[in-house]
Amino acid sequence: MHTVPAISRQRFFRYAGATLVTAIMTIGAALSTTPPTHAAPDDGKTVATLGHIDAPKTYWEGGTFVLKNEAHGKVYPLEQTVNWVGKGYNDTTQAQQFIYHVPDDPEVRFLRDTSATWYMAPQLPGWNQAPIWAGFGADADIPIEQFAGRTFTLDLVDFDGPGRMELMNYTTLGPLKILTRLISSHNPDLRSTWLTAGSHTHNMTLFSKPGRYTATYRVTARSADGTLIASRKYPHVWQVGGSQPGSTPSASLSDQFAAASDAPPQAGAYSLTVRPHHGRDNDGDDQLTDLVASVPEGTSGTVTFLIDGYFLAEVPVKDGRATWPEMLGNTTSSLQAVFIPADGTHARWVSPEVSYSTGDAAATVSSPASAQGLPQPASHDPAPAFSTDAYTPTDLGFALTLTPEDGETFSTTIRFNDPKIRATLRGGYYEAGANNPTCGLEPSEMVSGSKGAATASITYMQSDCDGMSLKFTVLPHALIGALPTEVTIPTPVNTAQPLTYSGTLRAASPAAPADPDSDPSDAAGTDGKPGGSETGTDPGSNPGAKPGTAPGTDSDSPHTQADPRLILNDGHVDIQARLEANGRLGIALKDDTRQHAHSSQVRELSSVAFALDDNTRRSTPRTPSGAANGPNFLPTPPAKYYLLDQEQRQGALWPGWSTTEVDAERAESLTLHLEPRSIPKGASYHVFTLGTFGETTELINSTREMTSITMPANIHAHAAWAFTQPGVYLLDASYSGTIDGAPASSGKQCLTVLVGHQAILDHRSGKTPSCADTPTAGTPTPDTPAGGAPSSESQPTDSGKTKTDGADAGTTPQDAAGAQSTGEQHASASASGAPLASVTPLGTQRLASSGAHGGMVTGALILAALGCACVARHPRCS
């Protein structure tokens, strides 16, 4: 078993009462007590836990889609991993963060209708990332240019487990309560989600019961000529609650049960008790239930606890008992215990079922005779089937209507004539000359006929979108025999007047893939194994940053510009800390936008310009009485500001920061500095996070001289960025910290941020200030090599490339566990956007090192909560 890791000095989880399996994780090691026998179904797999996990993550290998699990920068075959959600506690507040209490809000009534409490992998777990921070995504190097609509879908084609699974984001800001649903095991409209190259989520993952779940995925797309492309099916296992899978493969429970003595058990000596948890040592203990199996004194062996027949936990017997405390949720479950003796002198035993829900009175069952067979998994709430058959619509027609509502809002609805069509929309209402919509049309749920008609409606304030042109693309699911269809209504739209548009989708070839579920070795890569080798692989060694690739298509490509700084305005970027080959701490920009290349690139910050067009302009929401109801550092209504969300969204840049390229064993913490060199008069800039329950955490506030963020090494984080005035912001970016016990600093690079459409136009015409012509706002920080003396600020060569002292390109060190580090074949860009000289990947990142992302909330949440993309039921935004 490879265990994905813990953060030093920070508690991951604590077991109360008589729990007999304890995992104590520290940086560099994972220690656990193990029972004398093992029967957990996922023993020996790579355990992804305590940190940010991207699974499933889609890659393109051998001419097809491949699904993997990326855990802290290492990539593993998806089916050889298990995501484990244990009991997690915030390292600062000590509050539990594995139990989700559903609020009394109509937005999340669908959760409460199933259970008032759910097992949770949180969307914002804090620096220690306990118990797990789960998301999913796609590699930046997938050749979307080959696909119709430059997109593809991740489909949940099968789901098996004791309860339900929901992937979503939910947050509040004052009276605003905003929900974005991503994937649902039981909602037919949410069994598929659209992705594109570089897509990435940070979300809440909820389960209505603990236990073992298998979510089976595949990826589908249409080629540009209409041919259907589909991957094989990939199982992804979640162990929700329960015990951590063991370190080595073990015999199955059924094999151990068959090998154990089937002699009649001693009468009255075997029992199972289910009761409210004894003890209140930790937050959330009042929500736990104890499962207690009793066997004859002196008997050794293990007890496997089952929920609805699914594996829950394996616990060694001590002093005649095995106890497991668990959060069962509010639904009724059938609980059983299976005892496997450690020797042949005692009898095996299977308890009768105990029907139990959290808070019920204690119940005990015993049986004088063991069952002759094991209980079989049997969900009380099975998921509906998902058809993977291609479908040719009987009618390709659709209608889009604009309907004014209540004098302030309006809805945009699309309806397909054939209710079996599944599709989504991209686009929306555009201001004149804009490349991205101000009011986007992106339904969170699939437009499908599961409710009897294939429709979707999206509501905005009339004043937010009035007078704009309507442009959108209908993106049918790849299984639907239709191609992406573009619609443009160039006449300015009056959002106070009804509008109807009728159109017809383009027909696609009905051809199906040859055999997507054939032997995975035919298409999964170079090693004959599905999706990679047994150990983790380096995502950069195959799909990572590649110098010299052809420029991609982007919204700025038709424009010529006098300023050489590349405009980045849509997609994912990270301000990276790096350890260069000469030992110095460095800084660079990892560019996953694909706007100027077909693959991920690493560039100098001074070679690019972040651009926030007018589609990012927002207003602080108001309370019903008209008062401002947002963070106090944002402008008071009716003043507007410009916002980049915490989560990736259409038509906007998604900047974050990353220290994953710095070995956590060499650097305890690092600080990112974003200091103002030049900003518009009266302007300020802010970086902050917004939590599930409306809590706002300021990270950077230029008005208070808060211009730095300190974080552990091996962290990847995103947050919301706000700029209060249009214009050009020049920020000096640098990293500092302690490397190998000595102070170190990267030296400063100047980052340009263009805020507002006019600033972007001025940049293209060469009218914006350059970093070279604008002095720094203070004495430059010395660049100190790790463990060495200060050196001068990083200087470009005559060609604009960063000096790397002869670094060896493409080196990928191996760690002790055999997993490759995440160091890519780094290629940074000069001021003209050309690649920098390659440098050696950073220090080996051990599986037991820390790795996490900072706090995030879905972009739709921030867009709606902070950006006034208000639906009719919400207070008015101005």
Image (spheres, rainbow, N blue to C red):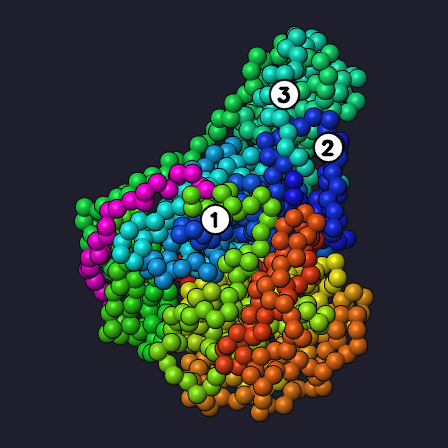
As measured in the structure, the alpha-carbon distance from the residue carrying label 2 to the one carrying label 1 is: 35 Å
The secondary element bearing badge 2 is classed as loop
State whether residue 506 appears in this view.
yes
Q: Residue at x 68, y 31 (%)?
A: 324
Q: Position of residue 214 (x, y in %)?
A: 50, 37
Q: Position of residue 59 (x, y in %)?
A: 47, 53
Query: Mark 1 is on which residue type?
Result: Gly
Residue at label 2? 34
Q: Residues within 10 Å of mark 1 (few under 14, many from 20)?
A: some
Quadrant housing residue 209: top right
Q: Residue at x 75, y 35 (%)?
A: 33
Q: Is residue 374 left or right of residue 470?
A: right
Instruction: Report the span colored magenta.
Output: 494-521
As measured in the structure, the alpha-carbon distance from the residue carrying label 1 to the one carrying label 3 is: 36 Å
Quadrant housing residue 369: top right
Quadrant housing residue 690: bottom right
Q: Is residue 240 left or right of residue 787?
A: left
Query: Mark 2 is on which residue type?
Result: Thr
Q: Position of residue 824 (x, y in %)?
A: 58, 62
Residue at label 3? 256
